[in-house]
Image (tube, rainbow, N blue to C red):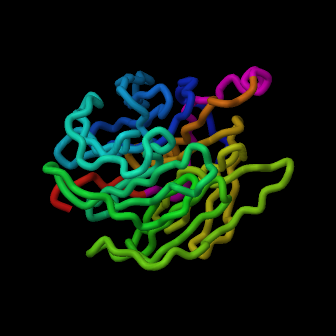
């Protein structure tokens, strides 16, 4: 799989770029800067990036079948209109919003929305992975995994049989048997564990799965995207020219353009001088396409 054409398509200088989502109807990439906080709409055909500011941190979102978005904000799960404006809170964050916010999330093939939280002090293991059950009149969050520091890397296998997610500070990617018909999942098992070193603290952040069932993980503080085979072994490594890639997503008409968000928050002045494109949006072509991103269905 060629990676020589990896390049910065948008010098966004995002503080914490995350959650890229390709919209095949509009042929644009939506993404967020969690700390700005804002939802972005990037048109690769024109290079124009529209910014929709939000009143609180936005960790993740999915496109809605009927337009607009469902999103995990600091305060809970919300619906947003097409310009990113909050419409209604569907469920409150059950954790302490002073030290917790929603982080990574997405929909399964049936249109159910899943979202995890981050334990910002990273001290108590108080973060969770949740499934949202309910529709526009409100709903509830069902905890699927507890005791996490940063719920991340949520993705589903192409056949819907597996749910993947990671706990970034613990350098671990988990896998669970999944039933797309019911939304139920089995016990969590360690699928891949990364061994850090003093020189390499790269750890699994946001992710995407391709059409062959391979799991692509952005390695925060690792300057790379790693493609894992379905058995959890490393298949390929793709260098990224900044320290903190955060998440990847497949886009373009053929779903063979891999977009990669990055971050610059918390990096030293010296590092940012050496890496002026930190916080930018990168892209590269892949031989294997990704999967179309499911949309949230209020009836799911």
> In the image, residue 227 lies at what x, y percent?
62, 59
244 vs 22, left or right, is right
Q: Residue furthest left?
A: 137
> In the image, residue 10 lies at what x, y percent?
53, 26
255 vs 122, left or right, is left
| Image: magenta residue range | 269-290
Residue 29, by quadrant, is top left
> In the image, residue 157 lies at what x, y percent?
44, 68
Q: Does residue 62 appear anywhere in the picture?
A: no
Q: Is residue 188 above or below residue 84?
A: below
Query: What residue is at 17 percent from the left and 45 percent from the top?
Result: 66
Q: Quadrant of the N terminus?
A: bottom right
Q: Is residue 104 above or below residue 244?
A: below
Name the residue nearer the viewer: 231 or 131. 131
Residue 21, by quadrant, is top left
Query: What residue is at 45 percent from the left and 56 percent from the top?
Result: 290
Query: What residue is at 47 percent from the left and 58 percent from the top?
Result: 128
Tag count in the figure? 0
């Amino acid at each position: 799989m060629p990676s020589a054409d990896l390049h910065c398509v948008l010098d966004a200088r995002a503080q914490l770029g995350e959650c890229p989502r390709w919209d095949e109807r509009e042929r644009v990439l939506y993404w967020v800067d969690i700390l700005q906080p804002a939802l972005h709409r990037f048109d690769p055909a024109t290079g124009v990036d529209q910014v929709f500011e939000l009143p609180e941190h936005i960790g993740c979102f999915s496109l809605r079948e009927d337009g607009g978005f469902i999103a995990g904000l600091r305060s809970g799960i919300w619906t947003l209109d097409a310009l990113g404006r909050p419409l209604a809170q569907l469920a409150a964050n059950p954790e302490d919003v002073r030290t917790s916010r929603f982080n990574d999330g997405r929909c399964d093939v049936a249109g159910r929305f899943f979202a995890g939280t981050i334990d910002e002090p990273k001290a108590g293991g108080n973060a969770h992975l949740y499934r949202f059950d309910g529709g526009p009149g409100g709903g509830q969050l069902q905890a699927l995994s507890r005791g996490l520091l940063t719920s991340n890397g949520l993705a589903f296998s192409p056949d819907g049989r597996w749910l993947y997610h990671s706990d970034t500070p613990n350098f671990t990617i988990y896998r669970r048997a999944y039933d797309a018909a019911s939304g139920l999942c089995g016990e969590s098992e360690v699928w891949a564990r990364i061994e850090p070193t003093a020189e390499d603290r790269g750890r699994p952040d946001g992710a995407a799965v391709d059409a062959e069932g391979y799991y692509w993980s952005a390695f925060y503080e690792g300057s790379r995207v790693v493609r894992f085979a379905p058995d959890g072994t490393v298949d390929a490594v793709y260098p990224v020219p900044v320290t903190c890639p955060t998440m990847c997503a497949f886009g373009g008409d053929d779903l063979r353009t891999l977009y990669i968000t990055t971050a610059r928050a918390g990096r030293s002045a010296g590092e940012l001088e050496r890496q002026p494109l930190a916080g930018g949006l990168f892209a590269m072509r892949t031989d294997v396409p990704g999967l179309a991103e499911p949309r949230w269905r209020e009836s799911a």
